[in-house]
Amino acid sequence: MSTGVDVTGLTLNAERLKDGSINLASLAGAHEVAQQRTAVHALKKTQDEGPVWHYKIGEFSLKDATANFTDNTTPRPVKLNVSPLQLKVQQISDDMSRPLPVDLQATLNRKKARSASRAT
């Protein structure tokens, strides 16, 4: 059985503030530092036991998306608009040793569309 995720019409607005932080990072909440011994132990345990569960996604498609980025760290803010944005990633799984076939089509600041395809 093949599974897929389709997203259409997504809009992303991101801003790099004057202090260099990115406003999207605030969505994740406060960063908490884990105790090193606990983190190292958990990593070793995961490596020894392998993943508890596995996943496979046949295809992830992003269609007719828009991404707006503003960088306020420069003397004059730099604005980038990527629209339309089409992205397709196939054969997604927890096996990080396998390349992922990726197709991307995007237009940056209303200039000529760019396309890229490759396994990453």
Image (cartoon, rainbow, N blue to C red):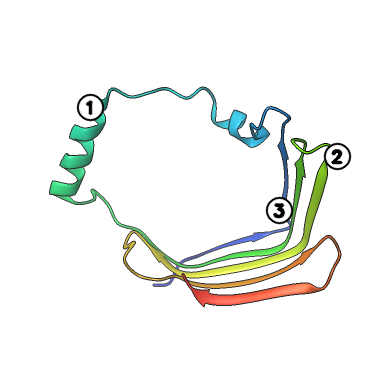
Q: Position of residue 70 (x, y in %)?
A: 77, 43
Tell me what residue is drawn at x 82 percent, y 48 percent: 79
Which of the 4 image quarters holds residue 98?
Answer: bottom left
Marks 2 and 1 sit apart, C-alpha to C-alpha, by 45 Å
- Residue mark closest to the camera, 3 vs 1: 1
Q: Position of residue 99 (x, y in %)?
A: 40, 71
- Residue 76, label in figure: 2
Which of the 4 image quarters holds residue 103?
Answer: bottom right
Q: Position of residue 47 (x, y in %)?
A: 18, 48
- Residue mark closest to the camera, 2 vs 1: 2
Question: In the structure shown, which secondary structural element does the residue marked by tag 3 occupy?
Answer: loop
Tell me what residue is drawn at x 21 percent, y 26 percent: 37
Amino acid on which disc 2 is placed: Arg
The answer to whether 26 is drawn above or below residue 49 in the figure is above
Amino acid on which disc 1 is placed: Thr
119 and 18: which is toward the camera: 18
- Residue 10, label in figure: 3
Marks 2 and 3 sit apart, C-alpha to C-alpha, by 27 Å
The answer to whether 30 is drawn above or below residue 11 in the figure is above
Crowdedness near tag 1: few (<14), some (14–19) or many (≥20) residues, C-alpha within 10 Å: few
Tell me what residue is drawn at x 24 percent, y 50 percent: 51
Cβ–Cβ below 8 Å for labels 3 and 1?
no
Looking at the image, residue 120 sits to the left or right of residue 111; the answer is left
